[in-house]
Amino acid sequence: MIRASLLATTLTATLALPAQQTVVKQFQPSPSASVAQDLGSCNVKIEYSRPGVKGRKIWDGLVPYGQVWRTGANSATLITFSDPVKIAGKDLAAGTYAFFAIPGPKDWTLIFSKNTKQWGSYAYSTAEDALRVEATPTVLPANQEYLLYTIQVESPERLRVELDWEKLGVGFDVAMDTPGLYWAYLQKTLAGVRPEEATPFAQGARYCLTSGTHLDQGMAWIDQSIKAKETASNLEIKAKLLQKTGHTQDALPFLQKAMALGAAAKAPQDYLDGLAKLKA
């Protein structure tokens, strides 16, 4: 009787639960997309929806000249900068912005708005502008059916963002102090690393070595890495830092030990050959 009572109670409770709702993913005529690019410690990301041409007149048609346009479809296009940048030579703080444009037959105005919670450009207000820059569109060599954003690396300190749709493209340069930003990132990150962690300090020291900057700090970091755990890699970095600072004779014992540890760990032969060549 007790079992029957428990079973009845459980069954009643189960039947009282609401039925699980089926979620149907909505079809998007203008599918959502995103594109991102790292440069040093900086990341630039664009989130947008991709409308199609579908045989329509786009410029000064679906997208009127002289009016604010959402630069995509559905919600306002968002662009995020993880660090301070310069857009077309003008300063813009790190953060996320709604990206709008005012197209024209010859020149466009590109707008970075602080209001990121918008559907389209219906709630756009000039009072919320963070930055405006001018740009000149170009004719594309081939038709771009669905609106497309690309981010290209132009140099160690500059990215190029391009918006292409139908037969027009427009873009802007994103410049940043890559070495300065990355150095600030390294200092902040390694300041929080535990002393017993060898790898992060070695990575910081390797940056100093390869960039040829902050060699004194690189030497301090590699010493911390070796103190935590000697490896072929951090001993090699130590040797190269000593050589770079004119202490070649002091470098040789570290290099010799790196070769021994590398051989014991069965490192790839080309790595061992490189150490032997460096020693010679």
Image (cartoon, grey):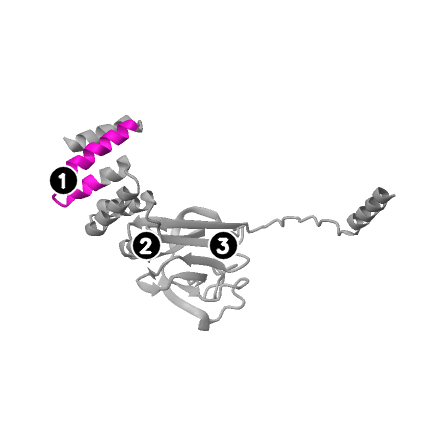
Query: For the point 28% across and 50% down, which residue is it?
Result: 156
Query: For the point 67% across and 49% down, which residue is it?
Result: 23
| Residue 255: image location, x then y, percent | 19, 35
Secondary structure beneath dot 3 equals: strand
Q: Is residue 271 visible?
A: no
Please identify the residue farthest to the bottom as the structure is shown. 127
Give whichever of discs 2 and 1 has the lower sequence position.
2
User: Which range of residues does the magenta coloring cover?
Assistant: 238-264
Give whichever of discs 3 and 1 has the lower sequence position.
3
Secondary structure beneath dot 1 equals: helix
| Residue 268: image location, x then y, percent | 30, 28
Say which mark, if any, is on residue 240.
Answer: none
> On the image, numbered disc 2 is attached to which residue?
191
Of the residues tagged 2 and 3, which is closer to the observer? 2
> On the image, numbered disc 1 is attached to which residue?
250
Query: For the point 15% across and 35% down, which residue is it?
Result: 252
| Residue 154: image location, x then y, percent | 31, 49
> On the image, numbered disc 3 is attached to which residue?
48
Q: Quadrant of residue 259?
A: top left
- Amino acid identity at mark 3: Tyr
Query: For the point 50% across and 56% down, which residue is it?
Result: 72
Q: Main secondary structure of the magenta part?
A: helix
Label 2–label 1 contact, CB within 8 A: no
Q: How many marks?
A: 3
- Amino acid identity at mark 2: Ala
Q: Is residue 101 left or right of residue 239?
A: right
Of the residues tagged 3 and 1, which is closer to the observer? 1
- Amino acid identity at mark 1: Asp
- In the rendered image, residue 250 lying in the magenta stretch gets the answer yes
| C-alpha separation, residue under disc 2 versus residue under disc 1 | 28 Å
| Residue 70: image location, x then y, percent | 49, 61
